[in-house]
Image: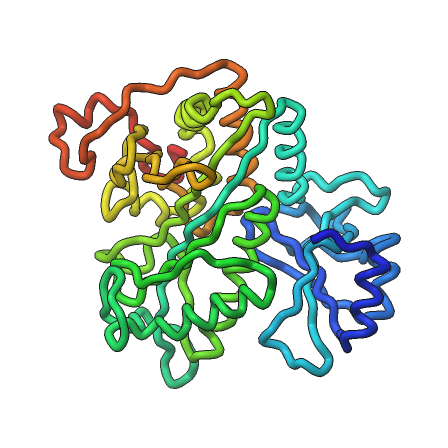
Amino acid sequence: MKYSPDEIMQYIEEEDVKFIRLAFTDIYGKQKNISVMPDELERAFHYGIAIDASAIAGFGCDVHSDLLLHPDPSTIAVLPWRPDHGRVVRMFCSITRLDGTPFGSDTRAILKKAVADAKKEGVSFAFGPEMEFYLFTCDEYGKPTKIPYDNAGYMDIAPDDKGENVRREVCLTLERMGIRPESSHHEEGPGQNEIDFRYSDPLTAADNAITFKAVVNTIAARNGLKADFSPKPLESMPGNGMHINFSAKSEDGEEIMPYVIAGILNHICEITAFLNTTADSYKRFGSNKAPKYISWSSENRSQLVRIPAADGEYKRAELRSPDPMCNPYLAFALLIYAGLDGVKNKAELPEMADINLFSAPEEITKKFKTLPSDIFSA
């Protein structure tokens, strides 16, 4: 929802807000913030709040480290786990240099530019991430272990599924923050969970992904647990994916999704390093519903891109290689540019691979190109 700075300052005064968290992410997508008091908010809107970025990953050196945070009033959200008296709110920020020029490592701004570039071409995108995470117990000192919170399996129910109440608390918290979860369930691995979202415009979807991870980590900690979004927390168990549902529409009504999918397939090797950012990311590929080959199909979960069974406004494609350690702002921006390249060049989709590539013999799989096998080749 659109709010003006004046409306935000009036809300802060009337609703007993005492702290305003100005949030942003480093180059890797890890959320950072600085808290300011209500009296500083007018300065934040009109000038910006200065930060020293020298110790923030990907933000530069000690010589020119001063940056300004500019809150986006449309992103205001109350943090429901904080006290009702002396409330805390959060707003995402754009980042500039002291002279007002955009900061090159502001990945949220990179995504905003990608959306604007797509609009110039008459194309609009929507994204909906599906993030998986494990819940691990903590020892008597509060340090996380690698002992899963439960031993339940895919879509099991309580009492086997001990994460049910945590997911419920996460979903209700997100709703109070203005984010609409679509569904939640226990995943295949012990202690593994998934919560999905209705897809939305790229910037909102990326903001929601960052918010989601913060909420899950907070709710897990409040329950004496550790949430783990890493791509392969347990060597012999399913990894955590962040499947990205996406759709694209042309303002002239042309059916462009085949071109978009083809563009993403053509560029997937170039952008995999940004979709799968850790060494463990590549241990997922080729097993437990994580793809290895560059292919597409309808409904088939062994493919890199699948077309889920859906009609009308729910029709979309799903990219299955990314994991939750990626920066969603960069990930969505790169997918937009890859898709736009497919549209501009009317890229041709390869033949649909309607086979199970997890179990197919080598004589079949050797026909397909593969994703990078490790972070160094990516």
Q: Is residue 49 above or below residue 35?
A: above
Residue 10 percent location from the top left of the image: 84, 67
Residue 63 percent location from the top left of the image: 76, 47
Residue 280 can be seen, yes or no: yes
Total tally of numbered discs in the picture: 0
- Residue 32 is left or right of residue 255, and the answer is right
Quarter of the image that includes the C terminus: top left
Residue 147 can be seen, yes or no: no
Q: Is residue 46 above or below residue 11?
A: above
Residue 106 percent location from the top left of the image: 67, 44
Residue at the front extreme of this rendering: 312
Residue 115 percent location from the top left of the image: 63, 34
The residue at 35%/49% (across/down) is 280
Q: Is residue 283 above or below residue 350?
A: below
The residue at 47%/68% (across/down) is 170
Q: Quadrant of residue 16?
A: bottom right
Q: How is the image coloured?
A: rainbow
The one nearer the camera, 12 or 289, is 12
The residue at 62%/33% (across/down) is 114
The residue at 38%/56% (across/down) is 132
Q: Quadrant of residue 365?
A: top left
- Residue 362 is left or right of residue 290, and the answer is left
The one nearer the camera, 207 or 171, is 171
